[in-house]
Structure formats: C-alpha cells, structure tokens
Image (spheres, grey):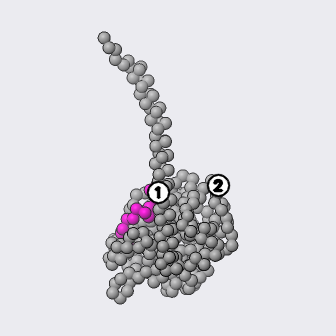
Amino acid sequence: MRRGFTVVELLVVIAIIGVITSLTIPAVQMAREASRKTTCSNNLKQLAMAAQSHNTTFEYFPNAGGLSGASRSKTTSGIPKRSIEQDWGVFYQLLPYLEQEALFSNTNDAQVAGAKLKLYFCPTRRSPTTVSGSTENGLTGSDPRGGVDYAGSGGDQQGAAAFPATGNMNNQNGVILPRPNAVPMIVTNRITSQEIADGLSNVVMFGERNFNRKPIGTQFDEDNGFINGWSFDTIRWGAKRPNQDRPILTESLTSTYDYRFGGSHSGVVYLAFCDGSVRGFLLSKSIDDLAFRQLVNRRDGKYPQLD
C-alpha cells in the first residue's frame, strides 16, 4: 500500500518552498529594477540625441521656450513655430526629433499638452500619466497635462537668481535657457556648440528631476506638464548635487529641492551630457555641491568627473 505525505513532511516541503521564494523574489525585483534603470538611461540618451539632431538642423541647441505659462507660438495661419520662435518649452520643441512630428504639428493645444509620452517617464517612478493643469499655456485648468520626469539643465543658479526680476537672462550658464527675444526676458545668445566652452562631454544637458513623492501629481512643479517653458516643470538647476526623491512631505512644495536634479532609483541619478552620453551620478560616491555646480556650468573652465 502506498503511503501519503505525513503532516511533518508537508510542513517541511512548505518551509522549503517559502525559503526558495524568499530568495527568488529579491533577485527578480533586482532584475526588474536593473531593466528599469536601463530604460531610464535610454530615455535620456534619446533626449540628448534629439537635441543633437536639432543642433544639426539649426546649428544651435533647443531652448527652454518663454516664461512659464506662455501660450504656444504660432504663425498667423495657425502653424506652430519652431525653436527660437517657440514659447513652449524644450520637451515640446524636441518632438519632431523623437518621431513625434504629427504631435508637434497638431494645432489643438489641449490634445498636444495632454499627450502621455512613454519616453518622458522614468519607469521606476511611475507609468505615463497626465497631471492636473492650470489656466496657463493657452489652456484651461480642466485641460490635463502630460507629465515629464526629466529636465533640461538651466545651470548653477537657484532661487531669485534663476528668475531675475530684471528679466536679464544672459548671465545664465546652463544649456537649456530661455529663447532669444522672449519678452520680457532679455536673451541674445543661442546656445551653440561653441557656447559650451567647457566641451560637450563635460556639461550636463538633461537629467532626472527631483520629486517629492507624497504629493506627486499635484505639486507646483508639474502643473503645466512637459510643454511648459522656463520653469520647475521642465528645468532643473545644479546649485546642489542630485538627490533621491523624498518619500514624505517634509518641506513646502516650493522648497529649494524643487530646483534639484534627482531620481527614483536606489543610489543613482542619470544625467545626459551635451555629447549625447549618459552617466550615472552615484549618490554615495559622486562629487559634492561645488563640483556639481561646475558640471552644469557650460563655461567656467572646470572639468569635474563622475565616479
């Protein structure tokens, strides 16, 4: 007669399965996060290469558009203007170089602003989504805005220095700056390869942007989405080194952290440089605040290197 499992044997089998599962799940999670990191890095790579394509076409890099909340610039016949004539920001201007010409040319502002582009989202942080909008950018507060988890580099300024009361923006030392002749901002420079005096491989152009995860989707630095111009929605500054997303609401929504680069990955933040390369900023080992300011300044003659 065949003997079945005893209770003790069954418990041993269950215990073994539990141990195997406990060992396997972390490995699976690590593999998934490694894949997400690769995707995030590739997203930034595509943004940097799109900016390179823009530079090839116009002989200068894309810009940050006009003031935050500005409407989309169009011709008298309703055709969206390009590059230095466009008040919508860098992530709108890059659409034609990301195989999104149809979206760029769509004359319906609400449809364009509400687009959820997978490329603009870090998969560790969230899936593509829209956020609540405000009555700006030629839209109403009921028009949702497609989010963006990346930002152009505005340089090493912070606070009032990044938004000077006089409107003179020619002292900004980043790469993604307001467009020339954007009233009331005084800007004359187009950012060419020659303007990046420290060398394309030494200056940050794009990076992951810091978030406060508790109010994500409702905070002030993404209420206009990826189309916005010179603002927290689409630009970050390097006065302080990058940091990981904050998990709880510990500061006001307009805290200085809103200026920083930062990400959702454990221990690393990804940055895209002007030459199209992408490198990881190791939070435990990489350079300090001073050196990071040098990394986002296109013309200070300093060349810090990431670990």
**Residue 285 circle label:** 2
Q: Is residue 269 magenta?
A: no
Q: Quadrant of the C terminus?
A: bottom right
Who is closer to the viewer here, 134 or 16? 16
Q: CA distance from mark 2 to mark 1?
A: 23 Å
Amino acid tagged 1: Thr
In the image, taking residue 43 as reference, residue 300 lies left or right, namely right
Residue for point 43% across, 71% down? 97
Percent position (x, y) of residue 133?
39, 70
Res 159 visible: no
Query: Dot 1: what SS?
Result: helix
> What crowding class fits label 1: few (fewer than 14 Cα within 10 Å), some (14-19), or many (20 or more)?
some
Task: Pick out the residue farthest to the top.
Answer: 1
Res 18 visible: yes
Who is closer to the viewer here, 168 or 294? 294
Percent position (x, y) of residue 70?
43, 80
Residue under circle 1? 39
Q: Quadrant of the N terminus?
A: top left
Range shown magenta: 112-124
Percent position (x, y) of residue 253?
50, 65
Specify the principal SS of the magenta part: loop
In the image, taking residue 229 as reference, residue 156 lies left or right, namely right
Q: Quadrant of residue 164?
A: bottom right
Amino acid tagged 2: Lys
Residue for point 51% across, 86% down? 181
